[in-house]
């Protein structure tokens, strides 16, 4: 059996950097470079040095434990997949240059798998034959490849990265739903055990459709996605979120009034002119839809037209150019629903349906209307969900104000169903009636290396990383203030005692100044630092520093191992 | 923390095959396919299904523990390596079509690393600066790629396979030697803990040179290498081994006698004719050396000319064709050292140097000599090491008869030194005198997936695999003879109790006949099988079968978990 050994900092391959590396923007990228955890080999390609690799192992083990806990079975498929399989699924054309390809010595094409749906579908298609054998969920943890156009942000967006990918094969939609629910539970626990504050966000699942995809987003300012969420449990990408935005009625008497607003061609200017919040005005956008037809889309003045929602409604649309505005008889800054030129379709955000007094452009240069009322003063062709939801908008579930922020996608679960792979690849089973049917498939990914980066984004300060115990490369560091003598010997003994307690421990035995040691230990972020010096020992104590709280305590030498080990063991995920 | 869970055979993804697959020749390949452990994805590309993957994990953990134990540090480099690094080392030209290459979207060439000397040298070359930081040993466990011309034998010779590769950087040759010795210890323990009977064999290190490379060969009839070894510790590839073969003197008086041997053109016929062992005759081979010059090489009659040794001495040589024999005045079947035509060089195996009475061809059709004596009757141009060593030849260390057999290379350790990578790539450190010097490098590989195959080669019988406990996918299987009722419930409880004892346990809960279950459990090779049936339970017992010995014992239900768990824990490596 393997045993826990003391690591010596003097031997540890963790070359630290004093300065922030110029190439890095994100905290996780900077700090992992500075702490000697990762090194760039080529664009988008990083080596995980020993400290990072220890954390990756712990993240993998948490992932593994959660997958095993819901009955998924670990295996490993080759990274190379034959292009023939990708032709069966039709994905080879869809993937484009992000898919790395190579020819073998016999000129057969292989792909470096970015995901492995084809491989796993091929694996089971001749061996799972009856509904009685289902469901089966298989997973692997593996290097994946994606030839990003612009690799960046260190481990966040690399060309080679570590993924957990799982594939489930069910006999019915209900069974798929059950596996999917189990996965959701496992993903939530995975994030929690890794120390990640993460939200399950209904993804804009595009071609997948419906509510059948959820992304697990770790909250961090560095995230690429913009999110809204609520304490009630609701969470969504702001691009995909849908709610009925609260709107205020505009100024005026409720009767349609034409007001001279010279030069006031922006929402901000109009709101200021009327002394009214922007939310009380209406923002009108003139578009040309995918079929070349003119559309005016209207949203509350303080919201934006959401591009993804607009694309779903209007196809390959664009905002009108100056020429197009002129051609359709519209005036920039003064567009509105009343007196729209003939042939221009009017589509309004559904949050405005109950509002009876709109402040809006008058379709005349330098004029606005107040008190415009739908039905009475103009006709709406369609009420649709048009806006990008904001922090502060009402939660669609409970009505409380939404919170907003950015997130890093660390995992995603999909219900793929029968069509996309199983039917195309002829992967079928005999159902209860003996009929051959394609499998109901699900797929489930976790970015292991990206999880590491997300943890650092959430857990750091100006001094360095602050590891959650569950994923710390070492749980405890023992720092000797002297290079030899009693302090050194005591520190060495304490380190051995921690190891004997099965604590992951590093002994800072280097001949460096105390300040250098403290700085490095803070940078590397070990959760508990046990500082051993002559002065403390004279009083029979050592100092224990909690990296997370900054708290320092003097603890009796005789007690420190038992006390710190107990805290660490309790904090393990 | 992760916990040990009961696996259920009814859910286990291990599709067994009743018949030997036609594609497989080796026992390991056949049995792992039949036991549902591996599946072929494409030529030389295999998926490890859950059972195999569990064993691979255990092998990896043993490897990791041994590496950590000698102070090596685990990390992970990208699989993709930039071709520019391979140009620095000059290996890109040397590697040929086995090296898989691809172009990224910017048309830069990358290699799929078959080994990672360049990557690791590049990693340290800017960060290890002083002798004080040395030695450092780094390792990784990773998928490796080699585009074999003829992938075959399942996991034994694949195109994608799992390797542990380690690289050491030392400041002196002495330090490199120490790391190398530590590695040798770790490799020996690795093999032993995996249950492998393996020999450390001095490799014919070719371009590496000297005694600085050792291969770890697992003994198995299926091995690609032919070995000789001795209980004293000596072991070598028979191609590289060198000893002084024992030779007997030939028949006759000791005087040169010309004997009529009509039609006796083979060693066998000549030995029979004289009523003498083949060893007492001399085998003469006529060659044309790499420079086009004629050579006669003579070896003891019962040994073969070793092609590798011959190539070192004679360059790109070949055996003479009939035309060449005629041209040089030599007669097939009757060549010998006496009366050699002028200009033919005579090279003899050094084991013959003390022999004074040779039986050999007379350079005349249908005639041999007996009693031919070097020095007296002919002149030898050179005494060289020419023969392939056999089982039975004397051990060069202790003189006892060598043993012979075949082996599978599972690992190799190399002293690379300074020139091959460090000097070429400008990877230097400042020595004690402040002089920049290239690192003294070592590299050390273990074939993890090949180890799995080698274990199966050594541990199987006609019924299937017989796992050593240390690497068994499950250490114990609990087999219920009934599909429900008391036997089933008791079996389920025993399985849970084993898991609570941290034993890796599978519960065979399937609705299959007992015969099918026994056959599958034997095929999958679980070391201890606990069989629970009504009849035994009536007497308060279950049957425990030891897969390795075939022994079956009735054990009290109340005692079986404690007793078997104790045996298993003691047997873990």
Image (cartoon, coloured by chain):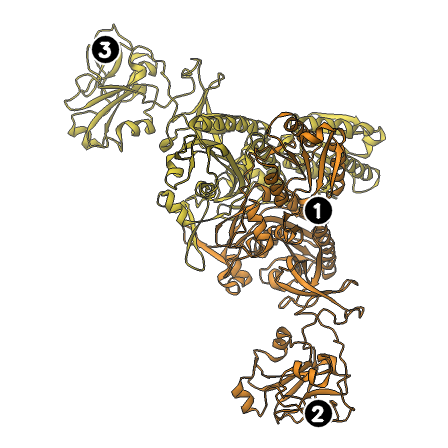
Chain colours: A yellow, B orange
The quarter holding residue A423 reads: top left
Dots 1, 3 in contact, CB < 8 A:
no
Q: Are marks 1 and 3 on the same chain?
A: no
Outermost residue toward the left in this view: A342
Mark 3 closeness class: few <14, some 14–19, many ≥20 residues within 10 Å = many
- Parent chain of label 1: B
- Sequence-wise first label, 2 or 1: 2
The secondary element bearing badge 1 is classed as: loop
Q: Nearer the viewer, residue B105 or A534?
A: B105
Mark 2 closeness class: few <14, some 14–19, many ≥20 residues within 10 Å = some
The quarter holding residue A520 reads: top right
Q: Residue at x 26, y 23 (%)?
A: A297
Residue A452 x, y percent position in the rendering = 56, 36
- Residue B378 circle label: 2
- Residue B321 circle label: none
Dots 2, 1 in contact, CB < 8 A:
no
With A333 as the anchor, is B333 left or right in this view? right
Q: CA distance from mark 1 to mark 3?
A: 88 Å
Q: CA distance from mark 2 to mark 1?
A: 60 Å
The quarter holding residue A76 reads: top right
- Residue A373 circle label: 3
Mark 1, residue position = B548
């Amino acid at each position: 059996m393997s045993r826990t050994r003391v690591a010596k900092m003097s031997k540890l391959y963790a070359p630290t950097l004093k300065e922030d590396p110029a190439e890095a923007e994100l905290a996780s990228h900077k700090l992992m470079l500075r702490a000697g955890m990762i090194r760039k080999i080529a664009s988008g390609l990083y080596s995980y040095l020993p400290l990072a690799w220890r954390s990756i192992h712990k993240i993998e083990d948490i992932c593994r434990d959660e997958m095993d806990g819901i009955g998924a079975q670990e295996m490993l498929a080759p990274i190379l997949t034959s292009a023939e399989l990708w032709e069966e699924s039709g994905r080879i054309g869809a993937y484009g240059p992000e898919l790395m390809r190579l020819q073998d010595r016999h000129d057969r094409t292989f792909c470096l798998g970015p995901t492995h749906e084809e491989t796993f579908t091929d694996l089971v298609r001749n061996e799972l034959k009856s509904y009685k054998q289902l469901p089966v969920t298989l997973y692997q943890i593996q290097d994946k490849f994606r030839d990003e156009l612009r690799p960046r942000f260190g481990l966040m967006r690399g060309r080679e990265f570590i993924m957990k990918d799982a594939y489930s094969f069910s006999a019915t939609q209900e069974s798929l739903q059950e596996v999917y629910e189990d996965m959701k539970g496992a993903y939530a626990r995975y994030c929690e055990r890794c120390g990640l504050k993460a939200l399950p966000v209904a993804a804009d699942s595009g071609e997948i459709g419906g509510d059948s995809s959820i992304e697990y987003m770790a909250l961090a300012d560095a995230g690429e996605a913009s999110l809204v969420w609520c304490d009630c449990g609701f969470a969504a990408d702001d691009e995909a979120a849908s709610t009925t935005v609260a709107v205020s009625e505009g100024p005026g008497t409720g009767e349609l009034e034409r007001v001279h607003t010279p030069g006031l061609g922006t929402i901000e200017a109009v709101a200021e002119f009327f002394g009214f919040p922007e939310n009380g005005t209406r923002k009108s956008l003139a578009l040309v839809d995918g079929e070349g037809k003119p559309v005016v889309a209207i949203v509350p003045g303080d919201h934006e037209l959401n591009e993804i929602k607009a694309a779903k409604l209007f196809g390959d649309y664009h905002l009108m150019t100056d020429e197009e505005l002129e051609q359709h008889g519209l005036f920039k800054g003064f567009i509105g629903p009343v007196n729209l030129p003939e042939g221009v379709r009017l589509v309004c955000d559904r949050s405005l349906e109950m509002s009876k007094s709109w402040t809006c452009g008058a379709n005349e240069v330098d004029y606005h209307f107040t008190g415009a009322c739908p039905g009475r003063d103009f006709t709406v062709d369609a009420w649709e969900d048009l806006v990008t939801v904001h922090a502060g908008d009402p939660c669609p579930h409970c009505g409380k104000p939404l919170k907003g922020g950015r997130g890093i996608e660390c995992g995603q679960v999909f219900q793929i169903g029968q069509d996309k792979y199983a039917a195309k690849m002829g992967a079928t089973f005999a159902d209860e009636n003996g009929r051959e049917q394609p499998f109901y498939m699900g797929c489930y990914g976790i970015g292991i290396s990206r999880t590491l980066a997300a943890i650092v984004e959430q857990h750091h300060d100006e001094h360095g990383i602050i590891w959650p115990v569950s994923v710390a490369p070492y749980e405890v560091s023992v720092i000797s203030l002297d290079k030899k003598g009693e302090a050194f010997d005591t520190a060495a003994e304490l380190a051995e005692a921690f190891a004997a307690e099965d604590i992951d421990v590093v002994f800072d035995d280097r001949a460096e100044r105390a300040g250098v040691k403290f700085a490095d230990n803070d940078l590397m972020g070990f959760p508990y630092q046990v500082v051993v010096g002559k002065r403390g020992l004279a009083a029979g104590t050592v100092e224990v520093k909690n990296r997370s709280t900054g708290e320092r305590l003097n603890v009796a030498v005789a007690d420190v191992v038992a006390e710190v080990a107990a805290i660490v063991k309790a904090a393990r995920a």
